[in-house]
Amino acid sequence: MTIPKCLNGFYASPVAANTAEKWIIGVIGQDILLANNADIKSNPFIDCNVAQQLDVFCKRKITLGQWLSRDCEVWDLTPEADSTDGFNTAVLRDLLAIAGEEVFSLACRAVQLLNWQDTHRFCGRCGQPNQATHKEHAMVCTSCNINNYPRISPCIIVVVTHGDRCLLARNASWASGRFSALAGFLEAGESAEQALHREVFEEVGVNINNIRYIGSQSWPYPGQLMLGFIAQATSEEIKVDGIEIAEANWFHYKQLPEKIAPPGIIAGALIKQFVDEATLIYG
Ligand SMILES: [Zn+2]
């Protein structure tokens, strides 16, 4: 089989091209197993020859597709794989901060596909077992033939601005001092814009307009697509809901809280964009 034309070096397919060499993405629970000397930014995945010693810990293998002219396989590993010499595990959130966009995207896809197969073993319509198909990454019911695809749940995340300040909030489950953009899942039937108005009003009691879409980021717990926005506030008074949000404040662009997300994470990217724009306007 010839390797199909790839977008950003990656072609998604459950079918192996049977290349001589493969990349192995080792997954332990929700963490990624990396070789100690791995180049985390551009390609931290494991060469198949090196991965052979991990085969004994492998519960399941899924072909993810082809990457950089090689087959790319996900190995679902038992926790014991972590103590193999020459390897260490990386938490996906940490990988987000240090790995390149393609690497993070593949790691997310790997974790998400395993999790999705685990939670879709039976048909939601008739209750009979599902089976992975070989045509695409789908689970098909062995009885009624319905296809199930990996579920993606869209979420909005927004930095609300008011002149030279932005509104950041602390989730009730976070440690003191940690602040971020407001975020929430879309409800059934909602547009992203409607979700933005609703979430911001529900969480902090602020009205918004001039919504601008900035960019998106995948997050595999359990399959979120974060849609990132910047919006302007039309009201200033903050009334936190006291349930999801413990506190929220307006922060001057030169006096942001210490504990905010880095720019590699979409919340951090939105905050950075606000700061860059405010710097241009206010100096
Ligand atoms: Zn069925």
Image (cartoon, rainbow, N blue to C red):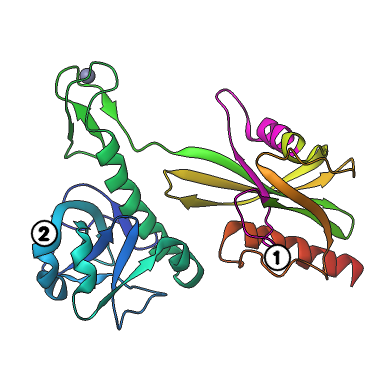
Circle 2 crowding by C-alpha within 10 Å: few under 14, some 14–19, many from 20: few
The picture places residue 196, in percent across and down from the top left corner, at: 69, 37
Q: Quadrant of residue 54?
A: bottom left
Looking at the rendered structure, the kind of residue marked 1 is Lys
Give the residue number, with chain letter if any, for mark 1: 272
**Mark 1 or 2, nearer chain start:** 2
Q: Which residues are magenta?
A: 171-200
Instruction: Say whether residue 152 is left or right of residue 171.
Output: left
- Answer whether labels 1 and 2 touch (C-beta < 8 Å): no
* Residue 17 magenta-highlighted: no
Q: Amino acid at mark 2?
A: Asn
| Mark 1 CB near ligand 1 (8 Å cut) | no
Q: Position of residue 25 (x, y in %)?
A: 26, 63
Q: Is residue 261 placed above or below 43 in the rendered structure?
A: above
Left/right of residue 198 with respect to residue 12 in the rendered view: right
Q: Residue at x 11, y 59 (%)?
A: 18
